[in-house]
Image: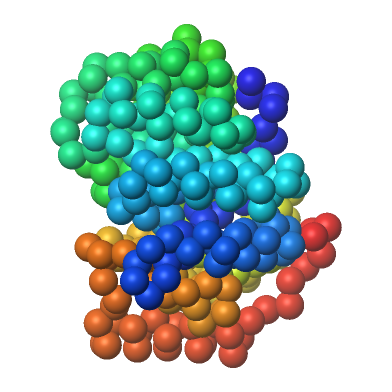
């Protein structure tokens, strides 16, 4: 199954677009996806954190994944986020995603309940064993409160279709710890934008990125430079990008990323409650960062895009 997905490169965590009444705008989301693929991204993560998964109904998630498959048209893999309160609901959603034809799933720990390590592992086993799709384990303890530690991940090494580990803890030492125990058993993905270069340096071969929604060419270029060991060229781009990448580590990362996306005319800043628009002072702060970034936007090295 893992061979069916090219687990490499930048996979933006695609934003979900809404109408003014907060209903899902599938056409606008379709346009967002087309723009990302046009600008060279390597894959798509639909209905992740930035896609506001937990604010969507199951029917809406199904419709978004169906639309994403249509928009991608096989050009890049489509990975669907799975974020549910119970293992049973997560498995139900995963089966729907498989029926639609997604290329894999990105599975979050069970939401709300602060599980013990053996319970977290059981959640992943339950879902993975019930589907015939490759699974990316998504660890984001600051947001989802349950930490998929290296020990938990290593305990899942016998689950053949758990193939990939996306870590958003910010602690890149975890990639080394996992590899020291199980070698290259798991494909490693950076999950936090502002440690992507460090993550690649210690073995990440992919990046689920928030800010690449607004700057897909810059994101893919940065990734390819670092992956190729062209750090002398990557560092200036990383330095330019860093104030924006820091926004991915904030609790209101979705609002920040969508505002940047709107400034770049790649989508709308509208988020669904409980996520509300940034207050004026915060919005001005983001706009100032964007103004500086656009005034100093670098010429990108050739990476084959």
Quadrant including the N terminus: top right
Reply above or below: 278 against 126: below
Colour scheme in use = rainbow
Q: Evaluate whether residue 271 shows in this view.
A: yes
Q: Is residue 57 above or below residue 153?
A: below
Is 268 or 183 nearer to us in this picture? Answer: 268
132 lies left or right of 53: right
Q: Is residue 115 left or right of residue 184?
A: left
Q: Quadrant of the C terminus?
A: bottom right
Expressed as whole percent of the image width and height from the top left, the position of residue 278 reads: 29, 78
Nearer to the camera, 283 or 79: 79
| Residue located 27% across and 88% down the image | 280
**Residue 21 appears in which quarter of the rendering?**
bottom left
**Residue drawn at 24 percent across, 17 percent down:** 118
Location of residue 283 (image quadrant): bottom left
Q: Is residue 181 shown to the viewer in this render?
A: no
Position in image of residue 262 (x %, y %): 50, 78
Identified at 49% across, 19% down, the residue is 131
The number of numbered discs placed on residues in the rendered structure image is 0
Image coords of residue 202 (percent x, y): 55, 40
Task: From the top left corner, tell me how far across and down residue 2 is, in percent.
Answer: 63, 24
Considering only vertical position in the picture, is 290 above or below 222? below
- Residue 213 vs residue 226, the one in the foreground: 213
**What residue is rendered at 19% in x and 27% in y?**
115
């Amino acid at each position: 199954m893992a061979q069916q997905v090219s687990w490499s490169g930048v996979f933006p965590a695609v934003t979900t677009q809404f109408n003014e009444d907060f209903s899902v705008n599938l056409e606008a989301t379709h346009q967002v996806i087309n723009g990302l693929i046009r600008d060279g991204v390597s894959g798509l993560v639909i209905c992740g954190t930035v896609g506001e998964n937990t604010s969507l109904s199951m029917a809406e998630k199904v419709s978004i994944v169906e639309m994403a498959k249509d928009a991608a048209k096989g050009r890049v893999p489509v990975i669907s986020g799975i974020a549910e309160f119970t293992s049973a609901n997560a498995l139900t959603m995963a089966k729907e995603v498989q029926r639609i034809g997604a290329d894999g799933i990105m599975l979050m720990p069970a939401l709300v309940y602060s599980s013990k390590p053996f319970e977290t592992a059981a959640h992943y086993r339950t879902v993975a064993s019930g589907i015939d799709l490759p699974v990316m384990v998504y660890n984001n303890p600051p947001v989802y409160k349950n930490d998929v530690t290296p020990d938990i991940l290593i305990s899942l090494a016998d689950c053949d279709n758990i193939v990939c580990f996306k870590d958003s803890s910010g602690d890149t030492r975890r990639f080394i710890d996992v590899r020291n125990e199980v070698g290259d058993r798991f494909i490693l993905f950076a999950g936090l934008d502002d440690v992507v270069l460090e993550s690649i340096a210690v073995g990440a071969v992919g990046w689920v990125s928030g800010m690449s929604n607004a700057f897909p060419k810059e994101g893919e270029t940065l990734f390819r430079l670092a992956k190729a060991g062209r750090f002398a060229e990557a560092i200036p781009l990383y330095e330019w990008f860093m104030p924006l990448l820091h926004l991915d580590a904030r609790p209101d990362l979705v609002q920040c990323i969508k505002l940047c996306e709107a400034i770049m005319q790649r989508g709308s800043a509208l988020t669904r409650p409980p996520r509300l628009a940034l207050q004026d002072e915060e919005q001005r702060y983001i706009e100032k960062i964007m103004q500086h970034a656009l005034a100093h936007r670098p010429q990108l090295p050739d990476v084959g895009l």
